[in-house]
Amino acid sequence: MTGRRLAWMMVAAGLVAGCGDKTAQTGGKQAVLIGQASPLTGPQAHLGKDNENGVRLALDEINAAGLTLGGKKVVLELKSEDDAADPKTATTVAQKLVDEGVAGVVGHLNSGATIPASKIYSDNGIPQISPSATAVAYTSAGYKTAFRVMTNDAQQGSVLGAYAVKTLGARKIAIIDDRTAYGQGLADEVEKAVKAAGGEVVAREYTTDRSTDFMAILTSIKGKAPDLVFFGGMDPQGAPMIKQMHQLGMTAKFLGGDGVQTPAFIALAGPDAEGALASNPGLPLDAMPGGSAFKAKFEAKYGKIQNYSPYAYDAVHVLVDAMKRADSSDPAIYLAELPKTDYQGVTGRIRFDAKGDLAGGAVTLYQVKNGHWQTLETVRSGK
Amino acid sequence: MTKRPPRWLAFSVLALGLAALPFLVDLGMGRSWVRLLDLALLYVILALGLNIVVGYAGLLDLGYVAFYALGAYVYAWLASPQFGLHLPFWAVLPLGAMLAALFGVLLGTPTLRLRGDYLAIVTLGFGEIIRIFMNNLNAPVNITNGPQGINLIDPVRLGAFNLSEPHRLFGLTFTGIHLTYYLFLLFTLLVIFVSMRLEDSRIGRAWVAIREDEIAAAATGINTRNLKLLAFAMGATFGGLAGGLFASFQGFISPESFNLMESIMILCMIVLGGMGHIPGVIFGAVVLTLLPEALRYTGDWQRDLFGHVYIDPADLRMLLFGVALVAVMLYRPAGLLPSTRRRREFADAQG
Amino acid sequence: MDIFLQQLINGLVLGSVYALVALGYTMVYGILELINFAHGEITMIGAMVALAVIGALTLAAPGAPGVLLLGAGLAVAIPVCVALGLVIERVAYRPLRHAPRLAPLITAIGVSIVLQNVAMMIWGKQYIPFPGILPQGRHEILGATVSDVQVAILVLAVIIMLMLILVVQKTRLGRAMRATAQSRQVASLMGVDVNRVIAATFAIGSALAAVAGVMVSAYYGLAHYYMGFLLGLKAFSAAVLGGIGNLGGAMLGGLLLGLIESFGAGYIGDLTGGFLGSNYQDVFAFFVLIAVLVFRPSGLLGARGAERA
């Protein structure tokens, strides 16, 4: 019986055998592969596609401008993979990208996928820049190859908590999170910062990243009469949440993190979005040199920015910037240049600290006014 | 009867083939496929475990992933910086499997009276309950580290021999994923052996009797209660074992790895392969692990065929996977490699 | 008191949506003993089609009254879902009617994956907002608030359920359905066209799913190709809670599940002295479900002692 098993395994292997790696040789130029990994299917596919588009735009621009490394013309080529926001698939995808010989990786989207994948990139010496993973654990594992162009939860949470109490003058604060690595991580840091600033957390409620009904938890929050509700989570939950707050006649302010500071939040919440507050790391796109140009180009090609594409776009530039300084696309050589990065991107000035986190990451606060996110102010995170 | 080659020859060819497989795959298809091979073996263990519950005893279990999670978390608790414990894997793996078995009995006891889809929904609930606890037990006391998961889990180590690092032996370089393959293969063979022995035993036949007609089975003097509990416990043991192996292999676990879809996928493996039939289950597990990955190449296929990528491979991948599930079931309703017994039953039902 | 009343209203609205979807599960199960896993996806398709129609009409006829637009959306979504339900039954389930029990479950999972991915390719990966075309009025009752949409959902759900009961109890089709559920063979001996009855069951279930899908997207203000999965799962749990195969059970189970979730999330902290919070609301819901099934193994209103293995 087991002999049949082997035969079948061979057949299965044969089925997929014709798919070995294909490293392109593009017209005499040397191709350098840049990996991108994010969920392209499943509930977060819209964000994953957005990251992929950000990477693609950067690659197209760099190729159009021409890139020469070590005296050779180089063409950057995208290898994009779907990690389905699943930790196991993420490691498979990471190994696949490594096999295909990528020189660097922009990804992954979620912390839960980024962390296990980072071990594989580290084992193989491939630099990785996540445009959106915020969990502290990603860079604290001590891998030399792990970087991010996004503030971590501690950085953003400390700013948000202090801002809620000191600037917005909220005394009683309710905190909701979606029990994902992102939402919970951010909400915990906000809670700490709120308490440190002298605010009171009157309610701590929870939902999931699949829910759309928050009436029950909002009703019990309403009973505690908070001045402000902080939500650690993404826009598909944030938008119905603020709608339901208004439906219940709640007047508390609504504050969120980068997950809700998106055009989709306004589109989904409609008029109810008015007055909502949220933060996003870095500087406002419109205020950055090249920011508006990026936005115009991106939206002409791919439609509205969902959330993290500017960070993905910057991540590519940071990789290529290091390659240029090292004059090589060999990961073993240009990796040494990455920690020295000082790059002016569309999301702000990018430098890394010893761990690979964004050094002195700035956080900008926004508010919805007349159906648009308006910049309130930019705060330096103390961490 | 055609003359068959002697048994020892068949076995040595098989053994040699299995031993050489990771190197052949590495050379022919790249290292990521060796990694997938490791995962495929892991799923073979899981599928064989679930097969005991669903295939042999006929108890539809949609919460099997809970045992997988328990095994993984036990490993992570006892061999990671989470509690600062770093016990060796040979001590941790059995503990995880035992705890999973205990929970198998815990789940089994209240659900003994339930049948079919009622059992399915209760086990589904059990799976979700375990996952939700794992996801939330970071406060008030941090046990699981919640949604952040547990990172830097120890790899399998035997004395100074670290399984996750490359080693040179007999002039060949064995990387971590190669060595993991042999470790997983060892456990897979063990699980296959246990499954085969169970199938042919009094216990195995009693399970089949319960599956076919519980009342008649009880009437013939089979202790249906104990045997059902034993099925849950055995299945859970394999699940817990696989969980421990998964944790050591990944080095990081978080509750999102143990969701309902995972249970459903394992169920698909055994039904697609041929329920209650060991070669079928193995085949189903291997195919369903490799198929979604093979479908990543649909972009290349399109380029080769039409010279252009019409549909984003990421969009097409899961679609084709779904179509494959439907198609296989329509044309082989008893599975790809059904046992002779099931094939006969099915032929009867058709007639 | 106002909080209690508010939670009651929250739970009833949520529960009536679950009940509508659960009816589709339970009707199919009653006749075929099949868990139609793709049923959740049909609610999603219903929402997506209705949104597409409403979007097109708002462009074509700006300023048209919202209720009319919604009606037009439903008028297209229902036939589309009915057709889809019939096709799924014909292609994926009918050939497997005599196959081993779990085979159709796997095709159902396959169909559900296919529908999700097709919807993703047609309507995109992003969340689609439901346009603000419906009246946004709120009413205060004894310190609790109810919105127009909530009232509409409750009223519509009650009307639909009453109609369904009338169809099943009073019409020829209903009698044929009940007969088929009792025994397919005997029913066909009595001259019932079993295939037609099964098709009609799928059609009715899909129509209910379409309505529920539109309700959900109007209520929460968004639609997404993945929205069907969780809704389907909850509705299936509700159907089992009530006793799968039993129409009244699905309605009761749906309402109960809505109330359990609502009160669970609202009061679990007080009940456990602050030890467990709303993060355990699903645990609470599943515990209730398990407890009910342990004491009543065939659900609340399920046939007792019936051999349904």
Image (tube, rainbow, N blue to C red):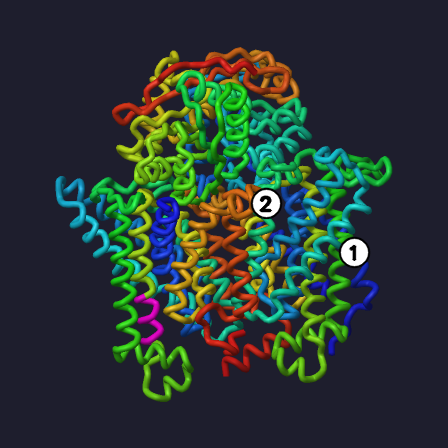
Whether residue B337 is visible here, answered yes or no, is no
Q: Nearer the viewer, residue C65 or C145?
A: C145
Whether residue A298 is visible here, answered yes or no, is yes
Q: Residue at x 21, y 50 (%)?
A: C70
Q: Tell me where residue B290 appears, x and y as whole percent.
A: 59, 50
Residue at numbered disc 1 = B15
Position above or below: A347 against B169: above
Spatial CA span between label 2 and label 1: 32 Å
Q: The disc labelled 1 sits on which kind of residue?
A: Ala
SS for dot 2: helix
Magenta region includes residue B191: no
Q: Earlier in the sequence, mark 2 or mark 1?
A: 1
Q: Tell me where residue A364 appears, x and y as whole percent.
A: 42, 18
Answer few, some or many: residues within 10 Å of disc 2's Cα (few below 14, many 20 plus, some between 14 and 19): many
Q: Residue at x 36, y 42 (%)?
A: C124
Residue at numbered disc 2 = B257
Frontmost of labels 2 and 1 is 2
Q: Quadrant of residue A97?
A: top right
Q: Residue at x 36, y 30 (%)?
A: A252
Instruction: Return the chain for callout 2.
Output: B
